[in-house]
Image: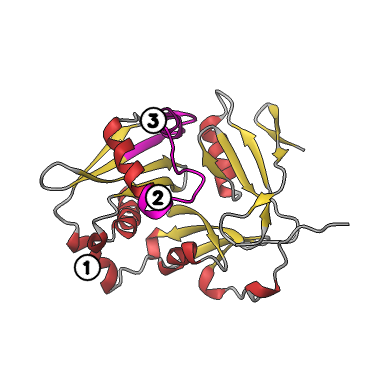
């Protein structure tokens, strides 16, 4: 499958079926393409808007034959509801020093990621990542990308997030934080900080990747309202959509 873009044809490829990391007992497939030199920022913009997600120099999106539980979502920053809970999280982290840098992986970041993965995702496919793999995750395929670090009063790195700047928003690629600082709600705080950054830059959206209906790991994304969901009819308000019961969705492979 190819798609016309700029002056060349962009090749797309389809992965083989693999166990779904979000919905137990189900299988997934992805369609993907590589970001070639010179096409990067424009291609990243166009395909992120169309529901793709960047991972290093690859742009991908779910392509499961009978399942559509994974939906691209983005926060409408101009109408974001700063409810009391969000204001408390901002206040709780007002002591943090925030700095934004060009992408460059460090051992300090890697050690924080390693602690985060061991605590939160020890059985995931990123567990046991080497420093070399971490460098590739941070630096490979960067597209108008920056890394934001959050440090406490002692200068200790407590959180970091890798972010792409798009023509209409910020796309949060990957974030990690100190798993022992639970009271800070650092995952939510980094999303709130991205909303503030987008507002200051007059960018209307913060892209959060995929919200997976039926996955407890992804329920937190629906708390950031107003949230928009990419549907076959385009981007629609999450609050206005009706979803079929997750038990009615058949994502299992068929065998003859």
118 left or right, relative to 252: left
Q: Nearer the viewer, mark 1 or mark 2?
A: 1
Label 3 near label 1: C-beta < 8 Å?
no
Q: Quadrant of residue 233?
A: bottom right
Label 3 near label 2: C-beta < 8 Å?
no
Magenta stretch? 118-147
Q: Quadrant of the N terminus?
A: top right
Residue ID for mark 3: 131
Residue ID for mark 1: 88
Residue 245 point in image, percent of width and height: 64, 76
21 left or right, relative to 67: left
Q: How many marks?
A: 3
Compared with 60, 5 (above or below) is above
Element under label 1? helix
Q: Quadrant of residue 181?
A: bottom left
Residue for point 49% across, 30% down: 141
Element under label 2? loop
Residue 55 circle label: none
Residue for point 34% across, 56% down: 187
Q: Which comes sooner in the sequence, label 1 or label 3?
A: 1
Pick out the residue farthest to the top: 37
Work out whether residue 42 or residue 71 is closer to the camera in this orientation and state it: 71
Q: Quadrant of the C terminus?
A: bottom right
Residue 166 point in image, percent of width and height: 46, 42
66 left or right, relative to 141: right
Residue 192 point in image, percent of width and height: 32, 58
Residue ID for mark 2: 203
């Amino acid at each position: 499958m190819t798609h016309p873009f700029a002056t060349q044809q962009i090749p797309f490829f389809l992965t083989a079926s693999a166990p779904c990391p979000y919905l137990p007992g189900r299988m997934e497939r992805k369609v993907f393409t590589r970001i070639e030199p010179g096409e990067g920022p424009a291609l990243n913009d166009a395909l992120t808007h169309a529901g793709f997600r960047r991972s290093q120099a690859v742009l991908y999106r779910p392509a499961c034959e009978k399942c559509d539980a994974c939906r691209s979502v983005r926060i409408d920053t101009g109408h974001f509801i700063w409810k009391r809970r969000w204001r408390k999280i901002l206040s709780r982290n007002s002591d943090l020093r925030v700095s934004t840098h060009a992408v460059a992986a460090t051992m300090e970041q890697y050690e924080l990621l390693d602690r985060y993965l061991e605590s939160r995702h020890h059985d995931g496919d990123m567990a046991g990542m080497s420093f070399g793999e971490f460098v590739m995750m941070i630096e490979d395929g960067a597209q108008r990308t920056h890394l934001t670090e959050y440090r406490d009063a002692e200068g200790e790195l407590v959180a970091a997030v890798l972010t792409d700047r798009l023509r209409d928003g910020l796309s949060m690629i990957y974030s990690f934080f100190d798993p022992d600082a639970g009271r800070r709600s650092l995952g939510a705080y980094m999303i709130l900080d991205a909303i503030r950054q987008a507002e200051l830059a007059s960018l209307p959206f913060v892209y959060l990747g995929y919200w997976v209906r039926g996955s407890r790991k992804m329920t937190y994304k629906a708390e950031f309202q107003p949230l928009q969901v990419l549907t076959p009819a385009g981007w629609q308000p999450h609050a206005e959509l009706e979803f079929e019961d997750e038990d009615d969705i058949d994502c299992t492979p068929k065998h003859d």
